Image (cartoon, helix red, strand yellow):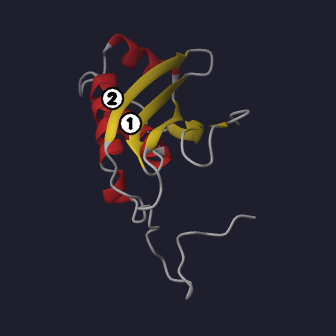
Amino acid sequence: MAKLTHLDAEGRAKMVDVSSKAVSAREAVAQAVIKMKPETLRLIKEGGIAKGDVLAVAQVAGIMGAKKTSELIPMCHPLQITGVNIAWEFNEAEASLTVKATVKTQDRTGVEMEALCAVSVAALTVYDMCKAVDKEMTITAICLLKKTGGKSGTFIRPKVD
């Protein structure tokens, strides 16, 4: 098992010093799945939610979530994010909406947490905008799908549960 790098010799939390790491191209892709009633999914697709264009608002929220990650997660480094893309996939058979975020940087550490924050905030925004019609929505399957760059190289999740 790998040693935890966010603890000092006394076991206290610390921010890892990445100053000696090389700057490289890094990318991470994450997802979240929002399960809902079929009618809610239909309303989102047709623009029938009273609060407005759910996907447009959630897309901007997801981008903001990626940009604010270091302010929300204590040990994350502020990074120069070079790109964030939010994509949506409707699954009518399962009455679900999948949000995927791709985050890119040229920096000393990866953007996995930024991608995970992006999908989390986007999914929460969908919930917020649709809760008046469906309080039973469930946000699930938040996970890292892929990451590239850095010393550890490429990771691709073999299967999403």
Amino acid residing under circle 1: Ala
Q: Residue at x 47, y 67 (%)?
A: 16
**Residue 129: x %, y % from top left:** 31, 33
Q: Are dots 1 and 2 in contact, CB under 8 Å?
A: yes
Residue 59's disc number: 2
What is the total number of numbered labels drawn onto the structure image?
Answer: 2
Classify residue 20 by image quadrant. Answer: bottom left
Q: Residue furthest bottom?
A: 10
Residue 26 in view in this figure: yes
Amino acid residing under circle 2: Gln
Quadrant in the picture for the N terminus: bottom right
Q: Earlier in the sequence, mark 1 or mark 2?
A: 2
**Residue 109: x %, y % from top left:** 46, 51
Residue 122's disc number: 1
Classify residue 58 by image quadrant. Answer: top left
Picture layout, residue 78 above or below residue 27: below
Q: Is residue 85 left or right of residue 49?
A: right
**Residue 120: x %, y % from top left:** 44, 43
